[in-house]
Amino acid sequence: MLPKNRARYLNALPIFIIVIAAFLRLWQIGVIPPGFHLDESFEGYEAWRILTDATYRPLYLRGNFGVPPLNAYANAITFGIFNQLGQPPGPTAMRITAALLGILSVAALFPLAHEIRKFDGNNTKLSLAFPLFAAATLAVMRWHIHFSRMGIEPIFVPLVWVICSWLLLRGWRSNAWGSFVGSGVVLGLGMYTYRGAWVIPFIMLAVSAYLLAHSVWTGTFARKRVVQLLLCGGVALIVFAPLALLFTRNPELIFLRLNQLSIVGQTGSPADNSVQQSFWAMTKMFGPFGAVGDADPRRNLPGAPALNIWLVIPFYFGLLLALVRINRPVYVVSLLGLIGLLSPGVISEYAPHFHRVLGGAAPTAIFCAIGLDQLWQWRPGRAQFVHWIAVALVVIGAFVGVRNYFVRWANLPDLFYAFDVGLWDLGQWAADQPADSTYISPRTLEHPTLAFALRETDPHARPITFDGRYIFPLAQKPVSPETYVSIEHEDFRTPLLLPGVFPDAAVEREMLDANDEIYARFYVRPPSATNRRPPQIERAVELGDGINLVGYDVQPETLNAGGILYLQLHWETDAAPTADWTTFSHLLRVAEDGAETQVAGKDGPPGNGSLITTRWVADWRILDEYQLALPADLAAGEYLLRIGMYQASGERLPADERGIDLGVVVIE
């Protein structure tokens, strides 16, 4: 029996640890991380649709290479609460959702660690401090803190593994049928959280097989254990059934992310690693081996290991102790969890990819706690203070981790682009602008960050977006000033083209990135400014559906085999086109007998798909460029250049014609 004061002290410590975890996950959540990057905004837009559209209840999010939906539903709830409080849905709300899940993971580690002690039996080598060390380690672990502050779904994985493992061990130890049912429910729900959680059923299957084998070996086998495990699996299958049925009817959904596996990646790509290389990268990710961590600033302090030196010491010590005590089931269960949750990183591109293996943070905390607990129990001779080394390692590790995250990482200039800060600010600005006089290049409305920023804008009153590297739209007779926003970090062409088209346009504003370099320029075209860039070759042809050709440019002046023919078509619109037309640009060899052979060509929607014809407006001039790659063995001579438009149905513009013959070009 513990003295009252000591018992009260121990009971207060879990609350203190959870408060620390909450503080580290919620402090400055509105500004760290900054911006609103693509993955977050995609799921945020889906959450907003779930909240506002009663008919939209997806079992799987088909965009962004396929995403399980539970995080979107969780964020829809948070958005609803924010609406009730008069706050706008957005990155802060989504990151609070993730923070709450992260805090819950820390809290759930207490019962799991307590269960590990009980499961280990009366002769356990783990003290009452073990659960405290486990939760404290996860609470201050920079790896887990980081993804508790991002509005994406990997933060579910540690929580799912912790609860599943706790309930399974509890059910096995205490013969509690309800615990097996609960473990099955959580296991099934885990399939709706994140693809990285899809490995957890295999981990639980391995754990179950081991526990059965161990019970046979020790003579404690009981048939009802098999029934209880089957009950757990059956409940999980029932919960998973709706998603499984969807996958059965749409098997392509399962394979949407196959190109992100290193074992099937494109040979020679920067992300392409052999399984052996990825395995070694995952092995080194905990340190202390220099720059061995995830190199992406969106996911990590670039190159930093998952654990700082103060936490990696007890981690490896705990791992060693687990191997020494491998004959005890709790250590095998923990090892299976660590290996299983890190396994997706072995076959994934860009190993070690920290958010794909985030589930490994929970068993990592368990092994840190095993090492710390052993130090806590170490009292050599009269040196009673030695056991406080364990507490010192956690405190110093916390200080270093917090500093690395909130000071070093949070002030990285790379975060401006990693988290789409400029695009998010631009989208919020565009939401307040008049639609018919605002143009943005090269990001389009299909980009989730812009789509979320403009979610409440009337679809017919949104800014005009286009990719200025391929196309440039302009109103022939504007009645008010127009603003062209060029994201010059990505669009090299619009800043070169626009001054030639509108010499009178003035730069009204410049948006700077974190390095004080130009991110975007805002050009204002006065109503009096007219188009100063006529076609090099005039050719007036009425195609139909409101579309007219007024001329074209061919560059360079001298064309050579193996080079690029740049063809810019100058279109005008009498009325808004009603159909989505594909443009073809073909270079033809014409034989003496009139036979034609295509030697080069380009078929595609205008603007490389960024400004399809159904988005064209009446009384527009559109400069639409196509690049035709000339074969290296193309013979010198004259070739015919032909263009036109068509649909998949076979309908063509001009109607019932092969196309428009622009003229002859000469290959030197």
Image (cartoon, helix red, strand yellow):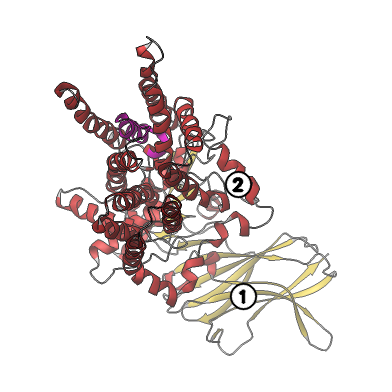
Q: CA distance from mark 2 to mark 1?
A: 44 Å
Q: Determine the residue positioned at 41% across, 23% down.
A: 375
Does residue 57 lie above or below 292 as drawn? below
Task: Spot the residue most to the top.
Answer: 382
Q: What residue span does the magenta drawing correspond to?
A: 124-144
Q: Which residue is mark 1?
A: 584
The answer to whether residue 128 is magenta is yes
Q: Residue at x 38, y 30 (%)?
A: 406
Q: Which residue is mark 2?
A: 278
Q: Position of residue 646 (x, y in %)?
A: 55, 81
Q: Is residue 552 left or right of residue 465?
A: right
Q: Nearer the viewer, residue 259 or 37?
A: 259
Q: Amino acid at mark 2?
A: Ser
Dominant SS type (magenta): helix
Viewed as shown, does residue 338 lie left or right of 627? left
Q: Residue at x 43, y 53 (%)?
A: 207
Res 374 quadrant in image: top left
Residue 10 colored in magenta in the image: no
Task: Decide which of tag 2 and tag 1 comes sooner along the chain.
Answer: 2
Residue 652 screen position, x and y as percent: 55, 84
